[in-house]
Image: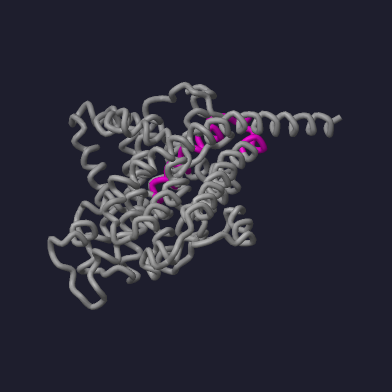
């Protein structure tokens, strides 16, 4: 794979989270290798799942059982929360997939090129993370100011009322622009960028560890998953989320080996084994929900099971790299379109659907499907064209400028 292909792949890794975000800030327009195109599609589907997740949160107080009531089998809530249909609304699980993808794709150029420019990477990464996030915050603030929000239009004690701003406080707005606030309210999906930014700073350490541990990567992956489970159980966010990025970086060291495994297994079993891998990955994403009757939500056991979604995401990434059928599905037009706009869609969808919910009342949540989803997609596409694409060019400039400045300083200092 060429340097340009590596950087093209990195430019499409924003999260979703991812999402999922570019490394050195490069954004050539040519397509990367097929396996990376499949990862784009996987990220796009994950971003779409997050949209449905937030619609389900708006609908929750109107369709979930009242406190003390049993869940009625075959009710809408039962179908959405206790069956494989949970794959359509598993927002947190989709974010973990974003983090695995970022850990892999962002690290690839650093793994492949010893002369990788860390100053260029950080400069480009800043442009590709912070500036789109600030643009999304301005969009959200504009919607709030133009279309005031009244809590009598929604369930005030629900997600829409408690985690989304009803007005703009300048001080809090400026604080949220740092992306280091754990519970942002202007555009509450930006909490994930806190971990994307932290991962960016820690990337040299992650890459070094992944290389040093490459001979024991399966054992290391098991240990890392275990650390994530421990973090989820004890409530440590760094221990919960940062190991997920490392799973992706560890995978990046063995991309060619995974592809070779896929070629050998496909030749012997017509892809049956990798189909099992895909199904196992999907099962792990929602295992904590399927086992609710035995291990209720909120318990330590359920928290640990939820974190196994990171392993599920890793298996889906493996299969996207290695398995022909799964990869081809992800390379189709719709997943690729969603992958192209995934970062923009992720950033803007909550301001859009929350604004619509306030306008129509959350009791009309079902109208968010025919109105909110198309509006979010259209806004995401427009944001991608108007904001993200120009920032791709700026990221390249920042990358090159930072690299040139550090090189010139080093040359001068060596004299």
- Residue depicted at 43% across the width and 23% down the height: 31
Quarter of the picture holding the C terminus: top right
Q: Nearer the viewer, residue 320 or 49?
A: 49
Task: Report x, y in % for residue 195.
Answer: 52, 52
Residue lying farthest to the right in this orientation: 415
Report the coloring of the rendering.
one colour
* Displayed quadrant of residue 401: top right
Compared with 236, 137 (above or below) is: above
Locate residue 330 relative to residue 239 in the image: left or right. left
| Residue extent of the magenta highlight | 95-121
- Residue depicted at 65% across the width and 29% down the height: 397
Task: Reply yes or no: does residue 109 show up in magenta.
Answer: yes
Most common secondary structure along the magenta stretch: helix
Q: Nearer the viewer, residue 266 or 302?
A: 302
Locate residue 87 relative to residue 248 in the image: left or right. left
Task: Report x, y in % for residue 175.
Answer: 62, 58
- Residue depicted at 49% across the width and 24% down the height: 5
Q: Can I make out residue 129 in this image?
A: yes
* Displayed quadrant of residue 60: bottom left
Compared with 376, 389 (above or below) is: above
* Displayed quadrant of residue 296: bottom left
Task: Report x, y in % for residue 17.
Answer: 45, 47
């Amino acid at each position: 794979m060429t340097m340009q292909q590596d950087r093209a792949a990195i430019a499409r890794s924003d999260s979703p989270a991812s999402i999922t975000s570019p490394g050195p800030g490069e954004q050539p327009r040519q397509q990367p290798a097929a396996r990376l195109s499949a990862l784009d599609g996987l990220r796009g589907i994950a971003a779409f799942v997050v949209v449905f997740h937030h619609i389900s949160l708006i609908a929750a107080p109107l369709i979930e059982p009242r406190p003390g009531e049993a869940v009625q089998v075959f009710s809408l809530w039962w179908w959405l929360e206790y069956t494989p249909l949970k794959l359509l609304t598993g927002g947190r699980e989709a974010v973990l997939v974003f983090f695995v993808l970022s850990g892999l794709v962002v690290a690839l150029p650093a793994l492949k090129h010893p002369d990788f420019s860390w100053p260029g990477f950080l400069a480009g990464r800043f442009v590709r993370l912070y500036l789109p996030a600030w643009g999304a915050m301005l969009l959200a603030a504009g919607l709030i100011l133009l279309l005031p929000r009244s809590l009598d239009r929604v369930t005030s004690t629900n997600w829409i009322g408690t985690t989304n701003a009803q007005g703009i406080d300048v001080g809090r707005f400026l604080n949220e622009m740092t992306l280091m606030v754990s519970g942002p309210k202007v555009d509450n999906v930006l909490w994930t960028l806190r971990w994307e930014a932290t991962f960016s700073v820690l990337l040299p350490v992650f890459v070094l560890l992944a290389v040093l541990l490459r001979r024991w990567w399966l054992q290391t992956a098991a240990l890392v998953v275990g650390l994530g489970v421990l973090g989820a159980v004890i409530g440590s966010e760094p221990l919960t989320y940062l190991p997920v990025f490392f799973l992706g970086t560890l995978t990046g060291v063995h991309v060619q080996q995974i592809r070779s495994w896929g070629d050998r297994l496909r030749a012997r079993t017509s892809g049956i084994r990798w189909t099992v891998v895909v199904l196992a990955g999907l099962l792990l994403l929602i295992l904590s929900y399927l086992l609710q009757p035995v291990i209720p939500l909120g318990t330590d056991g359920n928290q640990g099971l939820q974190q196994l979604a990171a392993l599920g995401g890793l298996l889906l990434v493996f299969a996207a790299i290695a398995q022909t059928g799964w990869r081809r599905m992800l390379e189709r037009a719709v997943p690729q379109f969603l992958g192209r706009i995934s970062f923009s869609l992720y950033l803007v969808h909550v301001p859009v659907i929350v604004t619509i919910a306030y306008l129509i009342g959350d009791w009309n949540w079902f109208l968010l499907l025919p109105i909110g989803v198309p509006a979010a997609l259209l806004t995401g596409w427009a944001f991608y064209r108007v904001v993200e694409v120009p920032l791709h060019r700026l990221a390249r400039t920042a990358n090159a400028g930072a690299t040139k400045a550090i090189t010139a300083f080093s040359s001068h200092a060596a004299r």
